[in-house]
Amino acid sequence: MFRLDTLLYPALFDWYKTTRHFFPLVGAVLLKRQDGVVYVDNPDKPRQAYVEHAFGFAQVFGETDAGFETELERYLLVDRQFAVTKVRLYGTYLPEFLDAQRFDKMRSFRQRFFATPETLVETETAEALRLDKVNNQNIVEIEEIFGVVKRFWRSPDDFIERANGIVVYYRGQLAGICYAAAEADHQVEMDFFVSPEFRRKGVGRLAITQFSNHCFSQSLQPVWDCFTNNVGSMSLRRVVGYFVVDGPYLFYTIDK
């Protein structure tokens, strides 16, 4: 298992975007827009790769290589050499070493959803709600309340420029945010938060629909990806017009 030089990331991205299961957080690492590490079986002509985002989201793709997966097993489950507190592994391809009953506690299921301008259900802005874009004037408050500014992006300036964030105020108080956790190959990984005291007031729905429309105006496809047991998220995506892309997929959370 070789750590790939960042100069070789673009070629790997060209390969990755042809695979069936494409995730913007993985693509953003290969495009060098966000931080992470990449390991391959052969740096000169890789056949299998493991990409790990700095926040922990990771994916294995390519042809099965027994030697590579043996070393990956040691990295993930024995030595636990990863720098993040936990690896969040997309299980769209499952290495054989994870297919064992003893790893049941690590397993969960997630599902992906898309929307189009035609399926998106618009919502009126109630008098108590006000919209704004993420900017230099509200970025500090956003980080204080939601703590998302450096979760995926490298800096506040990076977040302002690239995350396409939309915030919603409820009676003058910052109540919710929807933004891109990553963008790659014209797909954006959507993330949103609503402070508990402002839930069920239309804050999340408004933030999501406005963010989605902003994406559509830039020819970007927003992607909703959540745990299937997250009842609130699964219900809300239907209300705002996000439809099923594919069936649920395995997801592994591997603690340090």
Image (cartoon, rainbow, N blue to C red):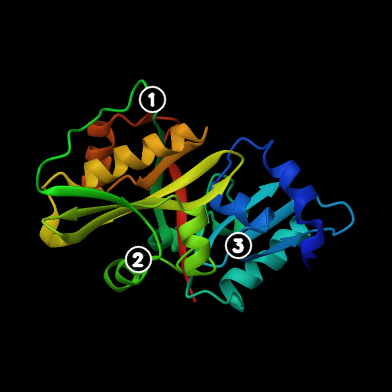
| Mark 3 or mark 2, whichever is nearer to me | 2
| Amino acid of disc 2 | Gln
Q: Can you identify the residue that label 2 sits on?
A: 137
Secondary structure state at the residue bearing disc 1: loop
| Mark 3 or mark 1, whichever is nearer to me | 1
Secondary structure state at the residue bearing disc 3: strand
x and y percentages locating residue 142 in the rendered image? 32, 66
Q: Quadrant of residue 7?
A: bottom right
x and y percentages locating residue 83 in the rendered image? 57, 77
In the visual, does 133 lie left or right of 76? left
Residue 100 in sight from this viewpoint? no
Q: Can you identify the residue that label 3 sits on?
A: 52
Local packing at callout 2 (Cα closer than 10 Å; few below 14, some 14-19, many 20+) is: few
Nearer-the-camera pick, 77 or 215: 215
The residue drawn where x is 40% and y is 45% is 225
Q: Can you identify the residue that label 1 sits on?
A: 117
Q: Is residue 72 above or below residue 218?
A: below
Local packing at callout 3 (Cα closer than 10 Å; few below 14, some 14-19, many 20+) is: many
The residue drawn where x is 44% and y is 30% is 245
- Sequence-wise first label, 2 or 1: 1
Q: CA distance from mark 2 to mark 1?
A: 30 Å
The residue drawn where x is 27% and y is 41% is 234
- Sequence-wise first label, 3 or 1: 3
Residue 102 in sight from this viewpoint? yes
Q: CA distance from mark 3 to mark 1?
A: 32 Å
Local packing at callout 1 (Cα closer than 10 Å; few below 14, some 14-19, many 20+) is: some
The residue drawn where x is 33% and y is 23% is 119
Q: Which of the image's four quarters has the N terminus?
A: bottom right
